[in-house]
Amino acid sequence: MGEMRESIKAQLNKVFQKVFDDEDIQITDATAAKDIDQWDSLMHITLIVSIEKEFKVRFNTSEVGKLENVGQLINLLLQRLGK
Amino acid sequence: MDKFKTIKELVANKSYTEAFELLKQALHKDDDFIVQHKAALVWKNFPKQHLDLKKIKVSVLSSSTTSHLLPVLDVWLAKNGLNAQLWESEFDTFDQMIIDSKSDLYKFNPEIVFILINYRDIDQDVENRIAHFQGLWDLLQQRLDCFVIQSNVDVPLTRIMGNYEAVLSSSNQNLLRKFNSRLGEAVKTGVTVFDLEYIAGMFGKKQWFDNRYWYHSKHAFNLEAIGLVAFYLSRLIAGVKGLSKKCLVLDLDNTLWGGVIGDDGINGIILANGAVGEAFVDFQKYIRGLKERGIILTICSKNEELNAKEPFLKHPEMILKLDDIAVFNANWNNKADNICSIAETLNIGLDSMVFIDDNPAERELVRSILPQVTVVDMPEDPADYIRALDEQALFETIAFSDEDRIRNDFYRDNSKRQALQKQFTDLNEYLKSLEMSSVVGDFDEVNLGRIAQLINKSNQFNLTTNRYTEVQIKSMMNDPAYSTRFFRLKDRLGDNGLISAVILKDFGQGVLGIDTWVMSCRVLSRGMEEFIFNEIISLAKTKQYKSIQGQYIPTKKNGLVADLLKNLGFVLERNENGVTWWHCEVSNVELKKVHIKKENYS
């Protein structure tokens, strides 16, 4: 379980680096919009769309807006990927 | 993703041109949004002042969120040679922005206004909606010198009435289709349609419609389609700016037919009679369709000329005939040299040429030696040729005139004239033998489309490169300060059509200024320059002007006319950073001898 979580986090980290065009980003469960300069509502959409594509998942309308930090994102991805 | 890292490193090392070429190559319309987004970020931080791109101001007005589209559109416009300044309206305020003459839209003063709508903007009263958009276009054109690109609407997949929606005229599906067809009819000068419905279909409507992002943040379509929308929109904008391609350079063996004519012979090549042969026939039909809409066709093949021409003359299934080809170039020289010679024969720029060849090595050679030429990546299977060429959207246009329909013939006749010229040692004798006549007239509604096309597309024979929209030209037609003349030219080998336009302006104090003088390069050196000069002089005399003032503003492409005014006998007045001013006293002028008979326009 923990291993899967770490592998998702690593994959997710790459998406963050791409979206924010910053190779130095290292996300943690606590990482939230306030921690990344450019993470505004516009970039939030870019991020969510890119995560959907990367992990081949589809979030619900209710989930699109309320994913507030990386921990929540990973939880949701674990759930979606059935792991 | 590493490509983008390389680009950034090149920029850091000040290799701007190389970085930009790589960025252009890294852009693919079908790539995921994240890749489009990455490319857009690289472009956003690119030191654009080091590149030679045409500047353009574009406003995007939309009833949906366009914040993700704009940066991607920006990088796609760059790929099309345009350094854009983009401005978007606040979400769903475009009506107000257009109606309020003091809005930020007018402060921004764009030359292109793109109005993006979607099916949610249309209600039962289609005619009322059409009238509403027409009203907005009118306001825009009254207040701005702008070209309007209006999107139509995507027809959604939901059908309350099921198949019966196709029957009932008041069904949602039928109303939206009706809106789209009425919108096309409502378009007038200075306005064109961006076919959003087509792009939705191409992307795949099951994916295109993603209501989650509409409910969440008012995105009208799936963000994954942004690359495709930006691609097609950038091509259309480039088309509006006169940057569409004009000429196809076609290989023969395994491009227009299967097999090698030199080895397989006329009976051995694959054309019709079988699955692959049918694919080649259809590809030829598509190419002929392009010719009929005004694209110049040329051949560039490594072959003996006689062999290469044989199928055109003898093969019963050939769709393309020798008459369809403006320049036929079959020899063993390298194709880059041959393309240059075709460009020279036709007198068109390399950047308006498209190279089609099944051989990747030939494509690579042309791409590396002539980066200005568009090289289409042809797929291996001839069944996919049409799609590969079509989906590049290389020939976007905002008008279609009779001139377009027969353009290829002009160029073909010109090749014949060049052959004829070789028979004469004396130029005057040759010109006389052409039996030329020119129809001269004031600009009018009938010819407006072609005149605007000439003014906006001529790069070489163009003294000032002033670009005017049809709306602006129309207002000059009604302004006593301006005199206008268009010129047609025909000879015994064919009609060249309307080939030159001149706009003269009253500069005051008895001075008549040449604001604009453009001419199609296909009639160069036949005395038309002198004929037009004579016309300008006699117009000046009739209107009692004392002198004529002309200006030459150099660009990268108009070196051809740097000495035009000098050669016509104008005297240099001043030179300001390469921009030269010339004048000539009307009373001192002798009319030039020409071999062109004048016919008045009626």
Image (spheres, rainbow, N blue to C red):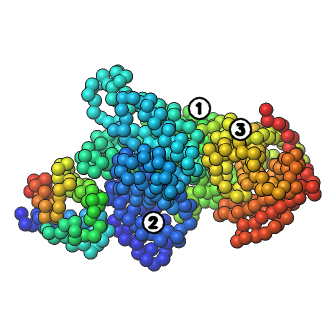
User: Is the residue marked by circle 1 packed among few (<14), some (14-19), or many (20+) residues within 10 Å?
Assistant: few
Callout 2 touching callout 3 (CB < 8 Å): no
Q: Nearer the viewer, residue B232 or B511?
A: B511
In percent of width and height, residue B415 lies at 73, 46
Q: Can the viewer see residue A11?
A: no
Secondary structure beneath dot 3 equals: loop
Q: For the residue marked with disc 3, what is the amino acid?
A: Asp
- Residue B444 badge: 3
Question: What residue is rendered at 56% in x and 50% in y?
Answer: B144
Looking at the image, tell me whether mark 2 or mark 3 is earlier in sequence order: 2
Q: For the residue marked with disc 1, what is the amino acid?
A: Pro
Q: For the residue marked with disc 2, what is the amino acid?
A: Leu
Q: Marks 2 and 3, Cα distance to the nearest angstrom?
A: 46 Å
- Residue B17 badge: none
In percent of width and height, residue A65 lies at 20, 54
Question: What residue is rendered at 84% in x and 55% in y?
Answer: B510
Look at mark 2 in the image and give the residue it sits on.
B22
Secondary structure beneath dot 2 equals: helix
Callout 2 touching callout 1 (CB < 8 Å): no
Q: Nearer the viewer, mark 2 or mark 1?
A: 2
